[in-house]
């Protein structure tokens, strides 16, 4: 996001240099802040000089990191689901488990990716009941009782078809969500 890059473009406050990095692990984007003592960057070869200023610089580093982490969390808002190594699938499974809810999915163009994603979480069988991949229009109408007009002639995905698929898989699996 260019706003985050802009936020950190000229950061070198309080003797701390901060850089922002992104790492994509579908469906997650990890945002990583890296901070270094600016003194260490300028003078890595002078270990005695760095050591003499480590305590004050470390406090500055931690304060600057906390300030920028808070700003990034504010900007990303509801897209932040964890600040540790908790995965998105584990977060979804925990939320379902916490709500005593279950889910089933009916997919088409995603080819089973949603079901695969949810089942990556340990213990997902507690909350995940069923996945149907109905790619061909015939199976959308036969298995999921989607109206032929909703499927369309060219099998294009549309909101009506998706809603009918979700309602049908939810009823079939008797889950909280579909």
Image (spheres, rainbow, N blue to C red):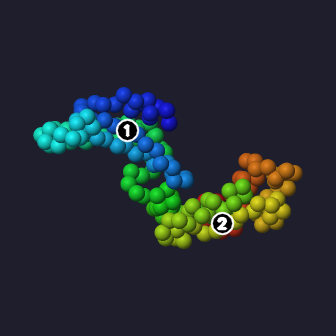
Q: Residue 166 occupies which quadrant of the picture? A: bottom right
> Residue 44's x, y, as percent?
23, 40
Whether residue 66 is visible to the viewer of this picture, yes or no, is no
Within-10-Å neighbours for mark 1: few <14, some 14–19, many 20+: some
33, 45: nearer the viewer: 45
User: Residue at the location (52% across, 68% down)?
Assistant: 124
Q: SS for tag 1? A: strand
Q: Which residue is mark 1?
A: 19
Residue lying farthest to the front in this orientation: 45
Q: Which residue is rendered at x = 62% and y = 59% of the image?
A: 114
Left or right side of 100 for 46: left
Residue 18 visible in image: yes
Crowd around label 2: few <14 · some 14–19 · many ≥20 (10 Å): some
In this image, 144 relative to 26: left or right?
A: right
Q: Residue at x 76, y 60 (%)?
A: 135
Residue 178 rendering spot, x and y as whole percentages? 64, 60
Query: Which dot, 2 or 1, sits closer to the camera?
Result: 1
Picture layout, residue 17 above or below residue 93: above
Instruction: In this rendered view, identify the residue nearer to me: 177 or 90.
Output: 90
In the picture, the disc for residue 83 is none
Q: Earlier in the sequence, mark 2 or mark 1?
A: 1
Residue 45 location (% of width, % of height): 21, 41
Q: Which of the numbered marks, if any, corresponds to residue 131?
A: 2
Look at 39% across and 51% down and name the residue there: 83
SS at badge 2? strand
> Residue 49: percent from the left, percent from the top?
14, 38
């Amino acid at each position: 996001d260019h706003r985050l890059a802009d936020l950190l473009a000229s950061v070198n406050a309080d003797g701390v240099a901060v850089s922002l990095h992104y790492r994509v692990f579908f469906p997650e984007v990890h945002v990583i802040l890296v901070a270094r003592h600016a003194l260490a960057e300028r003078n890595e070869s002078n270990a005695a000089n760095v050591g003499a200023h480590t305590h004050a610089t470390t406090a500055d580093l931690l304060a600057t990191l906390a300030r920028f982490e808070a700003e990034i969390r504010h900007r990303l808002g509801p897209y932040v689901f964890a600040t540790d190594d908790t995965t998105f699938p584990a977060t979804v499974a925990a939320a379902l488990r916490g709500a005593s809810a279950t889910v089933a999915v009916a997919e088409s163009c995603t080819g089973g990716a949603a079901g695969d994603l949810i089942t990556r979480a340990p213990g997902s069988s507690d909350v995940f009941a069923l996945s149907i991949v109905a790619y061909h229009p015939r199976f959308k109408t036969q298995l999921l009782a989607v109206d032929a007009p909703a499927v369309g002639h060219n099998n294009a995905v549309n909101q009506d078809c998706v809603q009918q698929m979700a309602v049908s898989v939810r009823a079939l699996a008797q889950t909280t969500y579909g």
